[in-house]
């Protein structure tokens, strides 16, 4: 376990800790909310190829729905055949229905590292992880406008959950109540989780976490919504 912790600190926590300290020292006014927004922009730039692929995949899935419905109606008494034909259609269209979850899992280490970093800032710890070329920042004020980013914030939690719900809606995820069979039930359950459960779960989690995490998620979701609208307007297709 110690080995995994050391790897996590080396790859995620220490670089993030130092990057945030550097930004905090550079930005006029030492506004930590601006630091988080800049961090989010930087991470979205790095993850842009994966995020764009996920958006295009969701768009392609929405466009495939008429053909999926035909498969369900044609083989409604053969669940195995429905699964085979659906899988074949996904392969033909080069669509991965789980690409959105892949992006979420990739961002989880960043969120964990961000959470640990803020805990370190609140407790005045973590200075031993500073690189030699990064100066000791002294006291770091965890504020953004009138918000204390070290504490949970109900408004930011609600806003984050709403934006996540909106993002899922504009990506074309809909609940198909007419679906039948195991594959369709599983698909419907997955869609419900994306549309309702994850935003609600996000809200509950953020009520117990520093609002810095909420600000990160809000900024990230707004950027993702903008990217989704761009893909929809420009008509970029799945490769």
Image: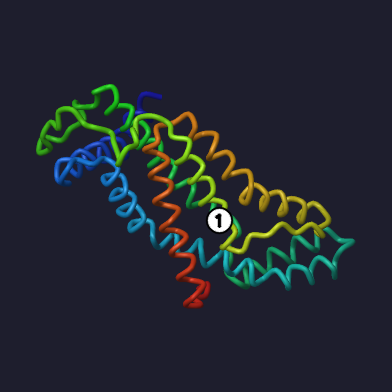
Q: Is 49 left or right of 104, judged from the image as shown? A: left
| Residue placed under numbered mark 1 in the picture | 166
Q: Is 151 left or right of 34, judged from the image as shown? A: right
From the top left corner, tell me how far across and down residue 178 is, in percent: 82, 60
Q: Is residue 219 above or below residue 95?
A: above
Count of labels shown?
Answer: 1
Q: Is 225 left or right of 134, judged from the image as shown? A: right
From the top left corner, tell me how far across and down residue 229 is, in percent: 48, 68
Q: Is residue 128 above or below residue 47?
A: above
Decide: few, some or many residues near mark 1? Use Cα within 10 Å; few <14, some 14-19, many ≥20: some
For image coordinates 67% across by 50% down, the residue present is 190
For image coordinates 30% across by 35% down, the residue present is 13
Q: Is 233 left or right of 97, judged from the image as shown? A: left
User: In the depicted view, which residue is nearer to us: 90 or 66?
Assistant: 66
From the top left corner, tell me how far across and down residue 189 is, in percent: 71, 49
For image coordinates 17% across by 42% down, the residue present is 29
Q: Is residue 27 above or below residue 224?
A: above
| Quarter placement of the N terminus | top left
Callout 1: SS: helix
For image coordinates 30% across by 53% down, the residue present is 42
Query: Residue 32 sits in which quadrant?
Result: top left
From the top left corner, tell me how far across and down residue 81 is, in percent: 80, 63
Extreme residue in the right direction: 77
Q: Is residue 63 above or below residue 185?
A: below
User: In the depicted view, which residue is nearer to us: 75 or 28?
Assistant: 28
User: In the depicted view, which residue is nearer to us: 51 or 8?
Assistant: 51
Extreme residue in the front direction: 146
Q: How is the image coloured?
A: rainbow
């Amino acid at each position: 376990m110690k080995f995994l912790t050391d790897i996590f600190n080396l790859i995620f926590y220490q670089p993030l800790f130092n990057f945030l300290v550097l930004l905090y020292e550079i930005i006029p006014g030492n506004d930590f909310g601006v630091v988080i927004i800049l961090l989010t922009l930087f991470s979205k730039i790095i993850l842009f190829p994966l995020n764009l692929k996920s958006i295009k995949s969701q768009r392609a899935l929405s466009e495939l729905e008429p053909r999926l419905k035909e498969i369900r109606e044609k083989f409604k008494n053969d669940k195995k055949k429905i699964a085979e034909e659906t899988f074949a259609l996904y392969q033909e269209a080069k669509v991965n229905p789980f690409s959105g979850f892949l992006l979420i899992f990739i961002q989880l280490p960043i969120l964990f590292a961000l959470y640990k970093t803020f805990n370190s800032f609140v407790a005045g710890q973590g200075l031993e992880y500073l690189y030699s070329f990064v100066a000791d920042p002294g006291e770091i004020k965890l504020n953004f406008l009138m918000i204390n980013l070290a504490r949970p914030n109900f408004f930011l939690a609600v806003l984050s959950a709403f934006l996540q719900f909106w993002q899922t809606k504009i990506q074309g995820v809909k609940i198909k109540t007419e679906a039948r069979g195991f594959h369709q039930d599983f698909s419907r359950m997955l869609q419900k989780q994306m549309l309702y459960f994850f935003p609600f779960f996000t809200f509950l989690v953020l009520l117990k976490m520093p609002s810095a995490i909420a600000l990160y998620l809000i900024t990230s979701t707004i950027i993702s919504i903008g990217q989704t609208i761009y893909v929809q307007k420009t008509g970029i297709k799945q490769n």
